[in-house]
Image (cartoon, rainbow, N blue to C red):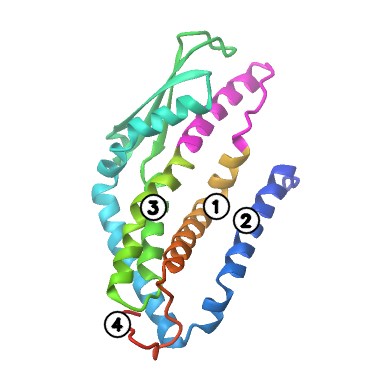
Amino acid sequence: MTNPVTLDDCLRLLIAWLVLSAMSFIFRRQLLNLTQPVLLGVLGRLLLAWLILSVLGLMYGKAMLSQLLPLLAWMINSIQDDYSASLTITDLAGGQLQLLASLRHDIAPLVKGDTLNIFNDTMHFVIPLLLLVSVFFAWPVKHFQARIKLLLLVIPIGLMSTALTVPFQLAGATEMAFQSLAHQTHLPREKPFYLLWVRLLEDGGGWLRSIAVAMVGVAMMQRTGDKPVRSANDKGMADQ
């Protein structure tokens, strides 16, 4: 027996459709005018970047994410007031991000001062960043300087993307644990506003968000004068 379609499901599909439609509309000319050599170059760079970054992510993903833990913990504590959150990266199962939630008030059946541990795979949060960098690296540009500009945008845009997603995902995982406890003890608990955003991110929205953010970065660069490559004969082109 299949599960019924809920309002949350419809909203997530609508948001995904709106994002894809907006990207298709904004970049319709570039996409339609891409020639086969340029398109093959994009696909080749995307595959190469993804393979290299996947290896680097496995090797250094935990170290990279650990630098952001103070910021992520601060944001988690800013979007909710039920508990005080602290973050650490453990060696469990190859690298788990641990959120320790110390309750600030009673959340039945738990009481103030109780703690709750939530674990998430670090790669769950690193992979969208790798996809973001891959899209930036693969985007067709006319010269090497434009490629450098594009890759430099990864730092601020990657931080912005992480700040708008990872804290909500971690807070959402903790909230779902509270919801499960409340359900088991037949106690009511309202769902916070950010759970809809978390559901969108968790149900396949991570890749969509990475592509959308990358294309926003491309659009920012193009507004400064760096236009995309459309054909192999573009004048002065040195990097497809």
Residue at the image position 28 percent from the left and 71 percent from the top: 145
Element marked by disc 3: helix
Element marked by disc 2: helix
Tell us which disc is closer to us: 3 or 4. 4
Q: Horizontal placement of 176 versus 92: left or right?
A: right
Give the amino acid type for the residue marked by disc 3 in the picture: Leu
Element marked by disc 4: loop
Pick the front one: 223 or 41: 223
| Mark 3 Cα-neighbour bin, 10 Å: few <14, some 14–19, many ≥20 | many
Q: CA distance from mark 2 to mark 4?
A: 35 Å
Highlighted range, magenta: 167-195
Q: Check the picture and name the quadrant holding the C terminus.
A: bottom left
Disc number for residue 129: 3
Of mark 1 and mark 2, the one earlier in the sequence is 2
Disc number for residue 204: 1
Residue 50 visible at all: no
| Mark 2 Cα-neighbour bin, 10 Å: few <14, some 14–19, many ≥20 | some
Disc number for residue 16: 2
